[in-house]
Image: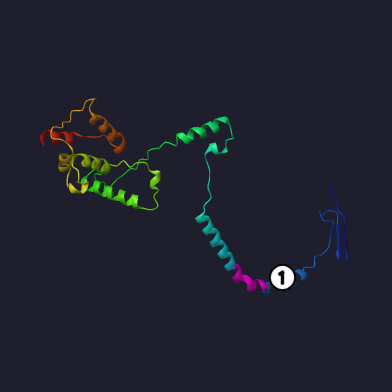
């Protein structure tokens, strides 16, 4: 059974049930007067505060854009110093990081053949535009291996002074880069086999079908 005693006298209340056994009324008139005095000041400074806040936001955003933070995720950067790390640094001075291939999947918007003459010429022009773009770090690219580039190398060897744009179709291009006595017979000792394997694995994403090329070389 819970009991309680409450005394009420004037402005004081004493209760044995309430957590605050002794409570006095709070006079808030002074706080209201102080807030009323600052209300006009806040009203006058509202626009300057807004402008300063906007300028600070723009300045911090510009600094973040011009100098973004760097996040290091290489575990070697957090590893403690050891003899193996020192040996790695000494070896790395003579054997820098090796290059890694990066493959770019090229398609046509209309779903056409990317190895058609028009596509090859357009691809070569796009590559030249990409190399001329100042945002591209060309020193990070060791070599560019593209279908137009390989064809141009063959033209430089077999038909010097000509470019890919000088040929309108594949038959004329094949006649310019392949000797008349070339056949489609591929043997393990022929350099053509390694070329076909490279093209099939690195330049195209579908099975290489050279039947039409062989038919042209045989029948003309």
Residue drawn at x 59%, y 66% is 52
Q: Position of residue 86 (x, y in %)?
A: 55, 33
Quarter residue 10 falls in:
bottom right
Residue 216, placed above or below residue 60: above
Is residue 153 something one can see in this rendering? yes
Question: Which of the pair 151/113 is nearer the observer?
Answer: 151
In the picture provided, is 30 more to the left or to the right than 66? right
- What residue does disc 1 label? 35
Farthest residue toward the left? 219
SS label for mark 1 = helix
Question: Which of the pair 119/39 is nearer the observer?
Answer: 119
Residue 26, placed above or below residue 135: below
- Quadrant for the C terminus in the image: top left
Quarter residue 184 falls in:
top left
Dot 1 crowding, Cα within 10 Å, few <14, some 14–19, many 20+:
few
Q: Which residues are magenta?
A: 41-49
Residue 85, placed above or below residue 58: above
Q: Position of residue 141 (x, y in %)?
A: 38, 43
Q: Position of residue 37 (x, y in %)?
A: 72, 73
Quarter residue 46 falls in:
bottom right
Residue drawn at x 75%, y 69% is 31
In the picture provided, is 167 more to the left or to the right than 122? left
């Amino acid at each position: 059974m819970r009991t309680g005693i409450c005394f009420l006298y004037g402005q004081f209340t004493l209760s044995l049930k309430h957590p605050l056994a002794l409570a006095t009324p709070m006079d808030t008139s002074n706080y209201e007067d102080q807030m009323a005095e600052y209300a006009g000041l806040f009203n006058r400074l509202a626009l300057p505060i807004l402008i300063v806040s906007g300028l600070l936001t723009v300045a911090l955003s510009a600094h973040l854009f011009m100098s973004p933070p760097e996040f290091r995720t290489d575990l070697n950067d957090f590893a403690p110093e050891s003899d193996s790390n020192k040996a790695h640094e000494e070896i790395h001075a003579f054997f820098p990081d090796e290059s890694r291939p990066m493959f770019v999947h090229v398609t046509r918007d209309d779903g056409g053949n990317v190895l058609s003459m028009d596509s090859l010429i357009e691809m070569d022009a796009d590559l030249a535009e990409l190399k001329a773009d100042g945002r591209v770090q060309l020193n990070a690219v060791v070599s560019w291996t593209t279908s137009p580039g390989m064809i141009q190398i063959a033209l430089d060897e077999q038909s010097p002074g000509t470019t890919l744009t000088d040929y309108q179709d594949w038959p004329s291009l094949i006649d310019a880069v392949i000797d008349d006595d070339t056949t489609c017979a591929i043997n393990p000792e022929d350099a053509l086999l390694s070329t076909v394997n490279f093209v099939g694995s690195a330049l195209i994403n579908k099975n290489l079908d050279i039947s039409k090329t062989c038919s042209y070389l045989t029948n003309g």
